[in-house]
Image (tube, helix red, strand yellow):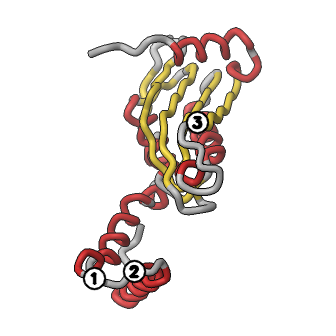
């Protein structure tokens, strides 16, 4: 995110002040610095706009003949719903079967974070992560599964506290071959390693 000039910063603060006033608040001591804190937090929460998948997946390694599933699972992620500006968060699982190139596992987590740190919907994050892996790694297959709880479901509207939304994107052999899809789903559900 680019650094705003002074006028943009003042305008942003004024928008937050008006929002607080519309919610019935006044700028008492506890709210005095809230507009600046909100803007600073938004710079971090929405930092995904200043990143690009090609930068994250820029360095790959020779797969050295490895042709099994590479799975990074149970990654926490946090995002903001573009419809209500409510947070949603959960766990992500990313798998691929390399052909020639592999990528460092932290890159998979960074890719999920990049897409999550934008105004989003869960379906778009899921599709975008899968599309980037296919484009940059050209794997035999790619699977992305996200499970999340949404603030817009918990604190407003239907108020369903324990609902979990699951989305998936399957590419290549994970889409075409039932046995490959079953294997990756079984790996995701297997017991976690206790460290």
Query: Which numbered mark, 1 or 3, is in the foreground of this view?
Result: 1
Quick one: which residue is furthest to the right in this view?
176
- Residue drawn at x 45%, y 34% is 108
Q: Please say if 72 is above or below 167.
A: above
**Residue 180 coordinates in the image, percent (x, y):** 66, 13
- Using a 10 Å C-alpha cutoff, classify the residue at mark 1 as few (fewer than 14 neighbours), some (14 to 19) or many (20 or more): few
Return the residue at label 3. Answer: 164
Q: Who is closer to the viewer here, 177 or 86?
A: 86
Q: CA distance from mark 1 to mark 3?
A: 38 Å
Q: CA distance from mark 2 to mark 1?
A: 8 Å
Q: Who is closer to the viewer here, 158 or 87?
A: 158
Name the disc covering residue 28, or none: 1
Q: Quarter of the image holding residue 129?
A: top right
User: Do residues under tags 2 and 1 come within 8 Å of each other at their CB atoms?
Assistant: yes
For mark 1, give the secondary structure: loop
- Residue drawn at x 44%, y 84% is 21
For marks 1 and 3, the one nearer the N-term is 1
């Amino acid at each position: 995110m680019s650094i705003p000039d002074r006028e943009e910063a003042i305008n942003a603060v004024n928008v937050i002040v008006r929002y607080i006033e519309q919610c019935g608040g006044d700028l008492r001591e506890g709210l005095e610095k809230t507009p600046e804190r909100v803007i600073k937090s938004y710079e971090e929460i929405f930092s995904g706009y200043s990143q690009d998948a090609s930068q994250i997946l820029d360095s790959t390694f020779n797969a050295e003949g490895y042709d099994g599933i590479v799975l990074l699972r149970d990654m926490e992620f946090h995002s903001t719903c573009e419809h209500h500006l409510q947070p949603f968060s959960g766990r992500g699982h990313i798998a691929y079967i390399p052909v020639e190139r592999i990528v460092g596992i932290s890159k998979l987590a960074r890719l999920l974070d990049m897409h999550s740190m934008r105004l989003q919907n869960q379906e778009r994050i899921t599709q975008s992560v899968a599309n980037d892996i296919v484009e940059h790694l050209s794997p035999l297959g790619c699977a992305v599964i996200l499970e999340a709880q949404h603030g817009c479901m918990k604190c407003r509207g239907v108020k369903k506290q324990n609902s979990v939304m699951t989305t998936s994107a399957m590419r290549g052999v994970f889409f075409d071959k039932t046995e490959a899809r079953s294997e990756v789903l079984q790996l995701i559900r297997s017991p976690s390693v206790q460290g």
